[in-house]
Amino acid sequence: MSLLVICEFRARTDGEAEFLRVARALASTAATEPGTLRYQWFVTQRPGHYSIIEEYVDADAAETHNNHVDSLLRELFAVADLVSVSFYGELNQYLREWISGREGIAVNVPL
């Protein structure tokens, strides 16, 4: 079963242009990853807020993606705040550790 991830970010006022650059770089990189099924950014109705839908063949592919784009993710988190994350599917140990202690995380497991 695939893993679907929906995130919302708030770009910092002074970093929105950089946020957009990094978000586009992440999407470009994800497009060539074999375990990534979908990686699409959206502009929300709230100024400075952006959502992303990510889908991976499984949680291990999501982990591989995060490791592959680690430097870009660090750049993204330097100019934006993570507002919320919703996972739909089974998480692996890496993701369970990543969500530990974080707020705004929803985990939805299959029936």
Image (cartoon, rainbow, N blue to C red):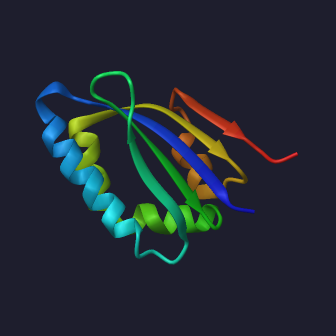
Percent from the top left, x then y, of residue 48? 27, 27
Q: Is residue 92 visible?
A: no
Q: Residue at x 27, y 46 (%)?
A: 76
User: Residue at left 65%, top 56%?
Assistant: 3
- 19 vs 31, left or right, is left
Of all residues shown, which one is farthest toward the right? 111
Query: Can residue 18 be spotted in the picture?
Result: yes
Locate residue 56: give its quadrant: bottom right
Vertical relation: 22 (above or below) 78: below
Q: Quadrant of the N terminus?
A: bottom right
Q: Quadrant of residue 42?
A: top left
Camera-side residue: 73 or 23?
A: 23
- Nearer the observer, 13 or 40: 40
Indicate the quadrant where residue 11 lies. top left
Which residue sits at x=64%, y=67%?
Answer: 57
Q: Residue at x 67, y 38 (%)?
A: 107
Residue 18 in picture, x, y percent from top left: 15, 44
Number of marks present in the image shown: 0
Q: Residue furthest top?
A: 46
Quadrant occupied by the C terminus: top right
Does residue 88 appear left or right of residue 63 in this picture? Answer: right
Q: Position of residue 37 (x, y in %)?
A: 55, 66
Q: Which of the two residues, 75 or 33, is positioned nearer the viewer here?
A: 33
Indicate left or right for 104 with 96 as reference: left
Tell me: residue 99, above or below residue 1: above
